[in-house]
Image (tube, coloured by chain):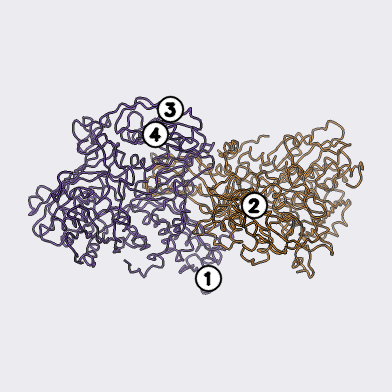
Chain colours: A orange, B purple
Amino acid sequence: MSTQKNAQFNVVGERLPRYDGADKVTGKAIFGPDVALPGMLHGFVLRSPHAHARLRSINTSRAEALQGVYAVVTAADLPPAGSTDHRYARDNTFASDKVLYVGHAVAAVAARTQALAEEAARLIEVEYEVLPAVTDVLAAMQDDAPILHEDMRTHSLAGRGEKPSNVASHFQQLKGDPAHGFAEADVIVERECHTATVHQGYIESHAAVATWSDDGVLTVYTTTQGSFAVRDHIVWLLDLPMSQVRVVPTEVGGAFGGKNTSYVDVAAALLARKARRPVKITMPRPDVFLATGPSSGAIFRVKMGAKRDGHITAVQAELFYEAGAYPGSPVGSGATVMFGPYAIPNGQVDGYDVVTNGPRVSSYRAPGGTPGNFAVETLVDELAEKLGMDPIEFRLLNHAHEGDERVDGGTHGSIGGIEVLKAAQACEHYRAPLTGPNQGHGVAHAFWGNWGGRSSCTLSVNGDGSMNLVTSSVDLSGTRTTIAMQAAEALELPPERIRPSVGDTDNTGYADVSAGSRTTYATGIAAIQAAEDVIAQMRARAAALWDVPVENVAYANGVFSAASDLRFTFAELAEQVTGSGGSVSSMANIDAAEWGAGFSTQIADVEVDPETGKVTLLRYTVVQDVGQAVNPTMVEGQMQGGATQGIGWALYEGYAYNEKGQMLNANFLDYKIPTALDVPMIETVIVEVPYPKHPFGVRGVGEPPILPPPAAIANAIYRATGVRPDRLPMTPAHLLEKMGVIGDW
Amino acid sequence: MSTQKNAQFNVVGERLPRYDGADKVTGKAIFGPDVALPGMLHGFVLRSPHAHARLRSINTSRAEALQGVYAVVTAADLPPAGSTDHRYARDNTFASDKVLYVGHAVAAVAARTQALAEEAARLIEVEYEVLPAVTDVLAAMQDDAPILHEDMRTHSLAGRGEKPSNVASHFQQLKGDPAHGFAEADVIVERECHTATVHQGYIESHAAVATWSDDGVLTVYTTTQGSFAVRDHIVWLLDLPMSQVRVVPTEVGGAFGGKNTSYVDVAAALLARKARRPVKITMPRPDVFLATGPSSGAIFRVKMGAKRDGHITAVQAELFYEAGAYPGSPVGSGATVMFGPYAIPNGQVDGYDVVTNGPRVSSYRAPGGTPGNFAVETLVDELAEKLGMDPIEFRLLNHAHEGDERVDGGTHGSIGGIEVLKAAQACEHYRAPLTGPNQGHGVAHAFWGNWGGRSSCTLSVNGDGSMNLVTSSVDLSGTRTTIAMQAAEALELPPERIRPSVGDTDNTGYADVSAGSRTTYATGIAAIQAAEDVIAQMRARAAALWDVPVENVAYANGVFSAASDLRFTFAELAEQVTGSGGSVSSMANIDAAEWGAGFSTQIADVEVDPETGKVTLLRYTVVQDVGQAVNPTMVEGQMQGGATQGIGWALYEGYAYNEKGQMLNANFLDYKIPTALDVPMIETVIVEVPYPKHPFGVRGVGEPPILPPPAAIANAIYRATGVRPDRLPMTPAHLLEKMGVIGDW
């Protein structure tokens, strides 16, 4: 779908191709696993076959003796830990006393070839005392559950628990008087939902090449969402000054939150230091599933009540999020997101962060939000049905407005949720009739907060008027282009004048990870500031050349002018200023403390095969408020990509464990992600409710579209089959069970 | 020799080791020829065997047909030339209509291996029409000389000449009334001197690796003194936007002016574009002699007159500088330098820039100055002798002061030449008696203007208070360290807090080449400005955190403070400011329009074997004004290295040509540069006359010490033998001829 271009902009709103498009298409772009340095060794990480075991001993001598092996490292090569958090990060790099999941790193080898490194790793003798494992959240909360961390006590408002527990923390959000609210309700719905652990499923594996100078400077080439995040992680674990670590980010072949965290960088650095040669580690695909950070499987108990007139009176929810081996699940953001779209007078949410014998979870696009949205939006659908209301009308009636306080205690700023719902209501798909039996039509709506954060942008003017723009924000999804477009807009110059690139931690200002849908928003602000500063500097230089007061120098449409006859095009002045007096460049560092939230409404048409339980997506539409689309083609790509990943959550994806805590589907054959054959061409409706605190009205785009698919599809399945799924993924087996075709699966 | 540390400084004046020292010593540092990219091809340049020939045809088809050959390029692959200068640069990349020197590039090949590229180059069929060649300056000026450029006319004050000529230009400097001045003189000395073409003799050959993105971005890794100079050269010859070319400078293994110019970068870029793969070209050593830019051989006719009281009354000089194949010899700076030290009322200097069938000359440490100093300072010695004066007393009597106008029309600023001469006079060596026969003691004095120019420095504060400093100034001779030391001084912090590095053209502001003894001076000023801006930003952030006016925030010795109880160390505030509000960094771009000149006096003791003419250097002292030594160890290294290269000019180095214009000694066996066996441990006396316009008083250091050695040694030889050499190098043959032992050599 096209969007109407905003006439106030010259560049913003154009469907420009990516600056880096050709290289990505032809395969020339250098991704993490492509990096090669002369004399480079290959690293391999030995990982635990046990989900829970005490490490009795590690003997590396046979591996070290193998010809062609240059270094073997274990936890003993890491400096001692300080805080508990530090210990968790250290132990997740190399296990010290216990292994806590299958795939937990135990040692690493650097050798002349990959095959030799793997052979050497097999020669490492590790003595394990195998312990009982627990991979299910509710089982992990039982009194007799195997305890992962003997010193862990539940942290809650009540203080620190007394007994060892796998519940790392418990929080409670309370608004109004939920008991009173439920008493007022005419209709109450409730359900328990279970969702699976899912992986971000990026195609590019984690890879890092580390090399040390003999002056003690470590350089790491790595695929990451944040070069500074990796730098700070390495500095933390290796106890180095920040200035001594240079992280060079490569192109990123998919990340989706999973590359906010560092996995192989420290191991590569330790091996390279010991081997005195560059060392590369590329994670094999099974290791990516087993030992990086998937998103939490979670369990929800949700209850909602509404009056006959449609107003929601109270909500209540318990959220149990699996954290994997160390605490830190996104249960908090799950809680924030679930009820976020609605104005709810009374509510209580209890969240639990629970450690289990799985890989430590990490961020995944709108972390924690997708399962929470599923839990709530299927109940919202049910409420609307019980009240005899159109599901969008019901949502509009209860929708939050700017200034409304949420159940999580936050307050909505400028939001476009109502506009999104109305656009969904108005779109042809919402009214389009279904065409056959076993078909259903579903809708779901979602709120996501987005993020601002710290960004940096350097803009340098060349003597021919062309410019180089460097950010420290790793380019995910074409942000080089959307950032440069904003700079071009602010400069009132064509975007081809600017060549954007991504710098490294030595030569750029600090930036937070490219995550939280923040990059086009926040780094865009930095680019605009740098552009405005460049114009100011150029005006001052023109004033000096013309010997007029700077306030008499005007700039518009690429031309500096003063009085009637003084005129420089940008390129003419660029030649002057770079020729003498020092060149013009600007480095803007910002911290965007405010940002605009996003909303997405999605419409799904499904057909469910009553005999096999197979769900076919017939048609799918994503409606979303993006504030101002900088590049509508890329915005649509985000909406389609996010929805496709949400469809993966909904129908296909999930970690399968056996009773020993071993993952059964750690590969892309058995762990199914949606492909082009599974998803129809996703239709998009861009809604633009400008965010007033961004110069061009931009809001984050990337995360909101992943939230609604499970609920939209579940609601469509209900209309096709009469049953309401309560489990993700909604596999044929689950649906057949719900439909009474088969028994407990 | 040690210098007294200036008590006003904490860091400046310390003998700190280089930040990059260990890597240079252990071989880990990446120099130009070390760069390797995956899939890289190897390039080889086919060069003319003739000194002068018309190019009839080039047939590359057999080379292109060879398996493993990916690209062959010639001048036909270059865009057409615009200006005459452009045509010269284009033709010096690949000859189009004529070859003008042995080694002139004709074509280039990229192939899978170096051997294959060389084999393919031999298959290129080039048809030459050989023309008579001229390699001697005076011969090239004859009316019947072979003409290199049919369209060349002599450019002079009188306008453009009418006839084709090899004299590209003629200038005249005139001060006072030279005829009157000579008439006033009691003593007049004159001499014609001939000096040889010499090479900078850097150990690292030129090497470049070029690679193109499919988005049209060219990246070139190259060994150069100026990444932006290479970028601009490529942009000029390939007609690209500046923003599309990224030049990444490598470590430099010697340059001395010879890497101000680009030789293989464009050829590598053309090959890489055609081959669609990275291409590396490393120049073989003979090609470096034949086809890069040595320094001009020159001929001088100099006359000087003085009164009985010792005052110089008039000077006159003619300078004939060989430019090689295209105009641009350093005859102008030769003229400026020769008489620069002295207050001379009347003078005339005529300079000629003459093309010859040799490689186009380029800069070499104090370009054009060393032979000019030889021509004048041997005459100065002779004048002093004839007047019966001590040679230093004679120079002191005639020395210029601040505000004096020179013969070249320039005016001296703050100079320390007299202090240098007095320091030389005071040093023990100047009075030390000689110990045997055939020994002599000589002294010479020199002026060099130095340079300022454009520089850029970025300083970024990390969360732990460490800092990264990035400059676009390529590090020659340890300038990373001397620049970081100045930043540390301005920051009032220990230098180990800063890690300096050299950026590329994408991520740094513009800088002129690291040349003209400008880097520590001008880039140091940029670093000080960046440091001062960082302090100002940090003060503002402290003021905001403390809620006090910024003018109440003091900074001293690494501590910010306000009122009695408000205090942050730099690192504490760094943690605060990088944690929120945006990080602190500063990018300073400067253009140093003024700078301080340098003077060096040198003292040589020699012994000349009367039978063989061999000159042995017994003792050697360099006295020099450096303004303020930032790092005395490195300053001494510059003084010793410069003097050693001057000793090469004096005694050993020179291109030898046969009558066909073929160089006979294009290798380090036959072209002798001084080694540790040829040079005594050079003593140094650092004189510090602060340059008032640099915050710490710094002056350029690198170039002045190369100037005096030929004259100092010639003057010593005269005292040892009674003959005054008038030719460089002062080979045994030349001295035996002068001494009457052998006839014309």
Mark 2 lies on a secondary structure that is strand
Whether residue A645 sits left or right of residue A113 in the image: it is: right
Q: CA distance from mark 2 to mark 1?
A: 48 Å
Chain for mark 1? B
Q: Position of residue B640 (x, y in %)?
A: 31, 58
**Numbered badge on residue B60:** 3
Q: What residue type is disc 2 on? A: Phe
Work out which quarter of the rendered image holds the C terminus of chain B and state it.
Answer: top left
Could you say which quadrant of the image residue B127 lies in? top left
Q: Are marks 1 and 3 in contact (CB under 8 Å)?
A: no
Q: CA distance from mark 4 to mark 2?
A: 45 Å
Q: Nearer the viewer, residue A131 or B84?
A: A131
State the residue position of label 2.
A44
Mark 4 lies on a secondary structure that is strand
From what the image shows, is residue B79 above or below residue A497?
A: above
Q: Are marks 2 and 1 in contact (CB under 8 Å)?
A: no
Rate crowding at label 4 as few (under 14), some (14 to 19) or many (20 or more) other CA atoms within 10 Å.
Answer: many
Q: What residue type is disc 1 on? A: Arg
Q: Do the residues marked 4 and 2 share a common chain?
A: no
Q: Is residue A592 visible?
A: no
Q: Position of residue B347 (x, y in %)?
A: 16, 49
Q: What residue type is disc 4 on? A: Leu
Q: Do the residues marked 2 and 3 share a common chain?
A: no
Q: What residue type is disc 3 on? A: Thr
Chain for mark 4? B
State the residue position of label 1.
B567
